[in-house]
Structures are given as structure tokens and as C-alpha cells.
Amino acid sequence: MSAADIRGILFDKDGTLIDYDATWRPLNREAAMFAAAGDPELALRLLEVAGADPHSGAVRADSL
């Protein structure tokens, strides 16, 4: 496949097509822990800076 074969890109941040809570929330937490080298406080801060509530996992509409 080449770039010429791509006809569109679909973003589904509201979970209409894929259940965001079941797929991305756990990955967001895992990525934050990885980036924080296992430091739970830093991981929570990274989630917050990225636009996720560090406790509920809910993501702001204007998040990254």
C-alpha cells in the first residue's frame, strides 16, 4: 500500500465506532506508566497534561 492508496483517515474520539473506554483508556494508562518509568505520581500527571482525568480516565474533548 502506498500513500496514494489512502483515501481518508477517520478519527473516532467520541467512541461512536470503537468503544473508547474499553480500548484506549487502558492503553493510555499503560503508556503513561511506561513514559513515567513506573512512577505512579508522574504517570497521573502525564495523563492530566494530555487531557485525561487521572482518576476516572475520562478525556476532555480538547485533549491531545
Image (spheres, rainbow, N blue to C red):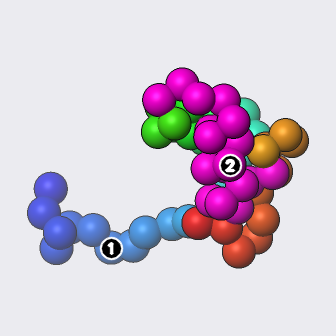
Is residue 16 found left or right of 28 in the rendered image? right
Identify residue type, mark 1: Arg
Q: Residue at x 27, y 68 (%)?
A: 6
Residue found at the very far left of the displayed protein: 2
Q: CA distance from mark 2 to mark 1?
A: 37 Å
User: Residue at the right extreme?
Assistant: 56
The percent coordinates of residue 26 (x first, y second) are 66, 32
What numbered label is drawn on residue 19? none
Q: Quadrant of residue 38?
A: top right
The residue under label 1 is 7
Looking at marks 2 and 1 on the same chain, the residue that comes earlier in the sequence is marked by 1
- The part of the image, by quadrant, that contains residue 3 is bottom left
Asked if marks 2 and 1 touch (Cβ < 8 Å), the reply is no
Q: Which residues are magenta?
A: 37-53
Q: Is 52 covered by the magenta stretch?
A: yes
At x 15%, y 56%, the residue is 1
The residue indicated by pointer 2 is: 45
Image coordinates for residue 30, horizontal then vertical, percent: 57, 30
Is residue 19 in view from this perspective? no
Of residues 61 and 49, the one nearer the viewer is: 49
Disc 1 element: loop
Is disc 2 surrounded by few (<14), some (14 to 19) or many (20+) residues within 10 Å? Answer: some
The quarter of the picture where the C terminus appears is bottom right
Write the residue at 86% across / 41% down: 56
Residue 34 inside the magenta-drawn segment: no
Say what amino acid the circle numbered 2 marks: Arg
- Depth check: give the residue in front, 5 or 50: 50
Mark 2 secondary-structure assignment:
helix
